[in-house]
Image: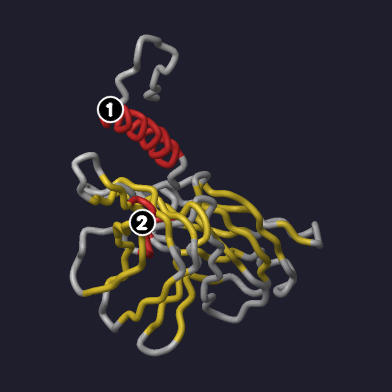
Amino acid sequence: MKNLITTATGGFPFTLDRLRWMDEGHKEALKALCQSLLPPGATSMILQGCEITVSATPDLYNVSAGWVFLQTDTISEICEVVAHSYTVNPGDLIYWEEEIIQDASGSVTFYDGTLKQVHHNTRAKVSAGEGDPGLPLVSTVPAINGTWVKPNITGSYDGDIYYKVNRFGLAIKGTIAGPSGNLFMLPVNARPSVTTRIALTSTISTYENTHFVINTSGQVSYDHNSNGPTYNTYYINTIVNL
């Protein structure tokens, strides 16, 4: 990490180059930390807050305050997010967009008598439009520790299943009761590289040959022990490597 040596005596020549050196050092360290914490397959991530709820028609996206790390071919920034809303029309792609906001506290008078702005905030907001903007899509930017998602389960089942993707892999938890069958599909960033079978536990230990099966296409299915009681409740709480 870049550090400014401030112990030298003799009249330190404090210039803008020194400020840039300090600024770059802090940014490089923080970005490296963010990159080390990225979940598998992600290039950007939500650091804190930024919860999105959708309401109304056309869709109104309500975004809570927080922080997000955005990284593309042209952007690599830690951005503040101020609570905001954005209307999305059918067919729009929804993405995170960087914006530069001037801070009034940075309006200063230079030695030559001119008034200039020297402070700005780097923020991010949700935007939408047709065509690929080359910016991180909201659907591809996970939270640093993941956000629990409750999928729509097909078929007649009791219980609740949740999943999330974080830097450790795919976390999945919940309960399930019902016959064998397909349950739901995982998004691309949550699919394992090899088909995975997860043994489930139950309050009735006699019936142990019951599994969740997650294949590489993202299909999650429930493989129930045919000799056991059809509606016994089984539990899952595990992390799958991606």
Q: Amino acid at mark 2?
A: Asp
Residue occupying image coordinates x 76% and y 61%: 202
Q: Which residue is mark 1?
A: 15
> How far from the left and from the top, in percent, is residue 133?
21, 63
Q: Residues within 10 Å of mark 2 (few under 14, many from 20)?
A: few
In the rendered image, which quarter contains the N terminus? top left
The residue nearer to you, when weighing 21 against 202, is: 21
Q: Is residue 189 above or below residue 233?
A: above
Q: Helix or strand or loop: what does disc 2 sit on? A: loop
- First of labels 2, 1 by sequence position: 1
Q: Which residue is mark 2?
A: 103
Residue occupying image coordinates x 31% and y 57%: 102
187 to the left or right of 241: left
Q: Helix or strand or loop: what does disc 1 sit on? A: loop
Number of marks:
2
Residue occupying image coordinates x 43% and y 45%: 38
Residue 84: assigned label: none
The residue nearer to you, when weighing 222 against 110, is: 110
Find the distance from the CA under tag 2 to the CA under tag 1: 22 Å
> How far from the left and from the top, in percent, is residue 43?
35, 48
> How far from the left and from the top, in percent, is residue 227?
71, 66
Q: Amino acid at mark 1?
A: Thr
Residue occupying image coordinates x 36% and y 30%: 22
> How far from the left and from the top, in percent, is residue 19?
32, 31
Figure quadrant of residue 82: bottom left
The residue nearer to you, when weighing 81 against 190, is: 81
165 to the left or right of 231: left
Q: Residues within 10 Å of mark 1 (few under 14, many from 20)?
A: few
Q: Is residue 206 visible?
A: yes
